[in-house]
Image: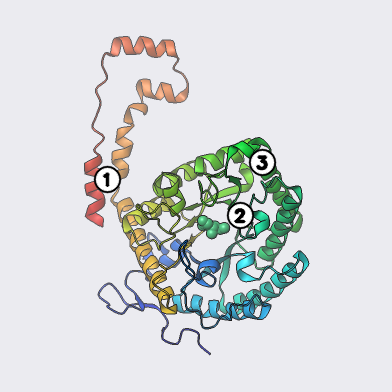
Amino acid sequence: MSYFPEVPQIKYEGPSSKNPFAFKHYNPDELVDGKSMREHLRFAAPYWHVMRNVLGDPFGGGTALMPWDDASDSVDNALKRVDVFAEFLEKIDIDFYAFHDRDIAPELNNLAASNDALEKVVAKLKEMQAATGKQLLWGTACLFTHPRYAQGGGTSPNADVFAYAAAQVKAAMDATKELNGLGYTFWGGREGYATLWNTDMQRELDHLAKLLHMAVDYKAKIGFEGQFYIEPKPQEPTTHQYDSDAAACLNFLREYDLMDHFKLNIETNHATLAGHTMFHELTVAANANALGSVDANRGDELIGWDTDQFPTNVYTNVEVMLVILGMGGFTTGGLNFDAKRRRESHEPVDLFHAHIGGMDAFARGLKIAAAIKTDGRIEELVKARYASFDSGIGAKIESGEATLESLAEYALSAGEPALASGRQELVENIINEYL
Ligand code: XUL
Ligand code: CO
């Protein structure tokens, strides 16, 4: 039984292929910089978009055709989706996936029933993994869809809601461990506020930190060895989310003594919403040794929401892959396509066109980033820009030898500094040589 009968196994055919069901640039086994493209890119598919996104928007309901799905909340329906997902992963040749507890299994009338449903689907996912070799990149708990979370999960003003959220995190961690997940993500969907006039921000932040510390303790207790991630996002659905950007997350982790236990999962569209480039967010995370994984998508400059489009902008992908190569590649993380088709692209085959596009655009990003790195001119240029700190007065500043007095004396005798050009246009020209 095939759920995508019109789609063949997607294979690499090279840049001159006109076959819409073929990779033009992603050649999984091709070596780039000593590693295969498959190993570098570590693509993941998100269960929530591939299997559950009906493609609604604020002005209209879902359009997605899902002939395999009876739209019920039954466990049987949830189990059947696993078969569809497996066929999708196999045909598109993606090795990893990610899920929320409530994407894979239904939320039922009470927590015990929901936990039970989750366990049943996890058992089936485990079989699927064994049969296909697919791996769980990360799991997470959905603490933002159900009305009980309207005022937050870990930051809810209601202690019973906090307890419910904690119970869901526990079950989702158990599920992730059972599936040998490589990571577990905390995205604080509603961990923020609508207005500060009704909010005790300090208390909410303290509570959020408590929840994360409980998760750290539970992780040690059950022997879960995956990596914890926090995923920054500034707003939507809340007015302000506490994990607003990479810098805010790092500050929070340091303040609450959590730095050793978390890395960041950086999403391109969330960077856009925060008023940053993806390049900026990744650099901030990498500098703190805290870049763990990437939700690979893109936003829209003209629409102010999280449009979650597929990452087809090669220029951005070059920047992403330069940072990833710069830190020596992913360890537990990967490129998770947290992206959905446009509402107009409602046919099942569009799932394939969308992912092929993202994978090819990232393959190009990887190859170009590796070429720029090998070329070395940009790296040289950056190094040369700071050369005045390599010796003399600059070296004394960096080593901590210099004082305000010694520098004042130096500046008086050195006279007006002679600045070298920043050469931005030259750098941009070098990048374009490779694009
Ligand atoms: C929402 C978002 C989430 C997280 C996981 O904007 O990105 O799907 O990735 O909860
Ligand atoms: Co995301």
Task: Answer with left or right where residue 315 lies relative to residue 152.
Answer: left
Q: Amino acid at mark 2?
A: Gln
**Label 3 or label 2, whichever comes before in sequence order:** 3
Circle 3 SS class: helix
- Give amino acid for label 1: Arg
Residue 115 location in percent, x, y? 73, 67
Q: Is residue 103 left or right of residue 275?
A: right
In this rendering, is residue 367 above or below 202? Answer: below
Quarter-of-image position of residue 120:
bottom right
Is ligand 1 within 8 Å of the beta carbon of the residue shown at mark 2? no
Q: Which mark is residue 204?
A: 3
Q: Is residue 85 visible?
A: yes
Position above or below: 251 against 158:
above
Q: Nearer the viewer, residue 133 or 36?
A: 133
Query: Split into 4 quadrants, where in the image is the C terminus?
Result: bottom left
- Residue at figure coordinates x 51%, y 79% from the top left: 66
N-terminal-most mark, 1 or 2: 2
Return the disc, 3 or 1, that comes first in the chain's sequence.
3
> Is 336 drawn above or below residue 124 in the view shown?
above
- At label 3, the amino acid type is Glu
For image coordinates 51% across by 47% down, the residue present is 235
Q: Residues within 10 Å of mark 3 (few under 14, many from 20)?
A: many
